[in-house]
Image: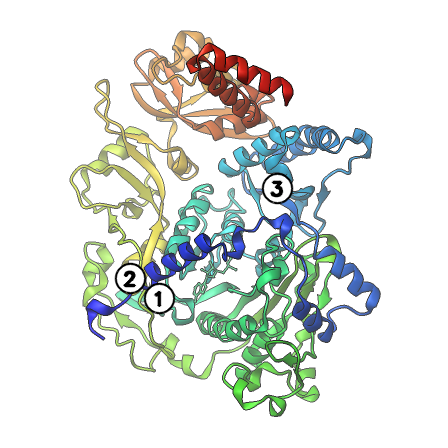
Amino acid sequence: MGRKNKQNPFAAKKRQKKEQAASGSDRRTEPYEEIKRDNEKFEKYYRLQNICVDAAEWQQFSVTIRENLPSAFRVTGFKDEAKALLNIIKTELFAEYIRGVAELRGTPADQVERPLCLPWYPDGLAYQLHLTRKDIRRSEPLYRLHNFLINETNAGAISRQEAVSMIPPIVLDVKPTDKVLDMCAAPGSKTAQLIEALHAEPEKYRIPPGFVLANDVDNNRCYMLVHQAKRLNSPCFLVTNHDSAYFPNLMKSAANGMKAVMKFNKILCDVPCSGDGTLRKNPDIWLKWNLAQAYNLHGIQYRIIRRGAEMLEVGGRLVYSTCSLNPIENEAVIQRIVSDYQGALEIVDASHLLPGLKCKPGLTEWKLASKEVDEVYSNFKDVPDKYHTIIRPNMFPLPKDQMANLGLEKCIRILPHFQDTGGFFVAVLCKKRQFPFEINDDKHLFPKKTEVETGTKSSENIQIDEGKSVPWGPQRKRRRLHGYKEDPYVFFEENDHDWKEMREFFDLDGSLNYRCLLTRCVTEKKKNVYYCSELIRDLVLLNEDSIKIINTGVKAFARCENRHTDHPFRLAQEGLQTTNAFMGPKRRVEISKDDLILLLKCTDPTKPPSTTLLKESTQERCKELSVGSCIIKYTDQRFTLNVVGWRGTSSLRAYVDKNETMHIMRLLGVDPSEFEINKYEKAREEALKTAEKTLEELPVNEIECVAEDAQND
Ligand SMILES: C[S@@+](CC[C@H](N)C(=O)[O-])C[C@H]1O[C@@H](n2cnc3c(N)ncnc32)[C@H](O)[C@@H]1O
């Protein structure tokens, strides 16, 4: 077919969606209330699988899966102020919650059930509310609760996440030294949890030695990952865009200027799935549920976990998870990968990491069925020829004697009625020994060009013939991906003029590696300067030609030219967690609570607060500080807060956004309501204004008619 006649598949899909919407056949346009929460095939199929022990349990399952899902959130544990925020949540927020729910439901406050602390989430940091996301979003009595959740999420202090979705990162058990790969990461709620675990020991590691690499095949969804991670400001984070089933071997620096294949010791495969465990959140799945989807997905899921297992270090841990109830997407995939690698992978019991979680063991028996679930197959011989391409022999459970040694019962199955959640499946695997084709991985070192080492040139000269099956594992065909062209990653060089000035001005100590500073454009005048860890720098430089890197580094400095100072950069709030660890006392101001509140309340950029309004000791310190960016520090017994400040000629300003301002206000015990918006109130005011305007424009006799109509109504 000539190029001219080639259809753009994305445009075709878009067109199709538009046409569907216009003809009313797009089922997603139906409001959730009107969706009939029933599907005969679903019911028949899962009864067949015996996912519930008896009729009474089936009844419970059946009722719960038709109810809307309660929402949940967790507090970002590694932040200094986490405990204080948790305390505020348990007292002030829950008091507001009880008041709001009582008003909404018209019940006495003492009859409103408190949010549930999830017993299996570490340190009591996660809660489930007895409200759906829609309740919270659409009810005026709950607007303050809603504002709190949005604002604290944006400030990176909490994450709104479905309860069961918090489980895979917990059982992956990430430590600050781990090299973590999240293979199907977008939109990134689990990635955020992995990053938090990486930063869990800030006293021990200024910058964690490990990293999190988050990957997704969908270019647009990769930017959701960038957004998620931005809230957590980690310099040990990288986003890539690739098909995980064909993820290339990444290279890392080895001794003597050589490079070697990178292996990960923690891998999360939260694979694409049919999602019938999310029926409570996505009722439209009732309308389209069918078995063909599960059969199709099994192959993709297997290829992703297989590639994950290949990239896993010996002794490393891999977590496989889906939000599907279907054994074809769950136990059948695990059975296949474990039996394919004959003892190299072992299923691990991780239940001790989830104390109090109600769950069932993985299934060891299941049946397959035709698409309409009108024929049931217990083994491949029963399957009619016409289904042989979609139903494969390895989807069936192994014979009992082989099944007995596999350990599928160590997998975790969660059904919605156990603890009022969505449905979920998790399996934890450990790699016991190398796969046969990996034998050469450790032995093979590849020459590394000196330009690559110094960061002045990418690895274009390195000849790696990925088409060959050896020496470092099977390389499979690559899928061409589309998406935006990314700007380059330009690392600082030794004699960088800006670095010298920054080091001097901000009193940065020698342990901050300037080679880890980067910009995203090749220009004399740098705009934003980012910082990433040494391992991430190495990964970027050695692999940018073999994988599409979407984003890395936290913004540490931003250009901010001002006629009262020669230094052209200011600190960026995003990167403060990192830069703060390396800055000496020269550009720091310690202030009192009252001073901090005063600075935060001053939101008019044209009227920065005069230093004369601050405490005398702060005024004295300001006199010593030249004009420019600085760190404003506040400490009490509970926590230390650092915010970016700007010392003007006669002023001191805090450079924090609205979400951060409200977050700090709350922590300081100040009512942040003056920054809050009641969207319902605002809508009423807007409506009133519009009505008044309309009336002003109407002739007098029509006004009388409108008034009369209103009275009749
Ligand atoms: C279940 S979602 C992941 C949810 C995510 N882990 C989280 O917690 O927010 C599955 C993701 O896999 C991605 N995906 C599908 N096929 C993939 C593939 N072959 N390689 C990489 N990602 C893939 C989808 O784009 C989707 O974002």
- Residue situated in front as seen by the camera: 536 or 363: 363
Numbered circle sitting on residue 542: 2
Q: Disc 1, disc 2: CB below 8 Å?
A: yes
Going 42% across and 67% down the picture, which residue do you hit?
244
Going 77% across and 30% down the picture, which residue do you hit?
106
Query: Does 411 appear above or below 559?
Result: below
Q: Amino acid at mark 3?
A: Lys
N-terminal of the two: label 1 or label 3? 3
Crowd class of label 3 (few under 14; some 14 to 19; many from 20; radius 10 Å): few
What whole-number distance in Å separates the C-alpha atoms at marks 3 and 2? 46 Å
* Colouring style: rainbow
Q: Amino acid at mark 1?
A: Leu
Q: Position of residue 197 (x, y in %)?
A: 54, 50
Q: Is residue 538 visible?
A: no
- Residue situated in front as seen by the camera: 665 or 590: 665
Going 57% across and 60% down the picture, which residue do you hit?
172
Left or right? Give the position of 264 relative to 355. left
N-terminal of the two: label 3 or label 2? 3
Q: Amino acid at mark 2?
A: Leu
What whole-number distance in Å separates the C-alpha atoms at marks 1 and 2? 8 Å
Give the total number of marks visible in the rendering: 3
User: Which of the 4 quarters of the picture holds residue 335?
Assistant: bottom right
Query: Does 616 appear above or below 375?
Result: above
User: Which of the 4 quarters of the picture holds residue 218?
Assistant: bottom left
Crowd class of label 2 (few under 14; some 14 to 19; many from 20; radius 10 Å): many
Residue occupied by mark 1: 250
Q: Is residue 656 visible?
A: yes
What whole-number distance in Å separates the C-alpha atoms at marks 1 and 3? 43 Å
User: The C terminus appears in which quarter of the rendering?
Assistant: top right
Crowd class of label 1 (few under 14; some 14 to 19; many from 20; radius 10 Å): some
Left or right? Give the position of 76 relative to 15. right
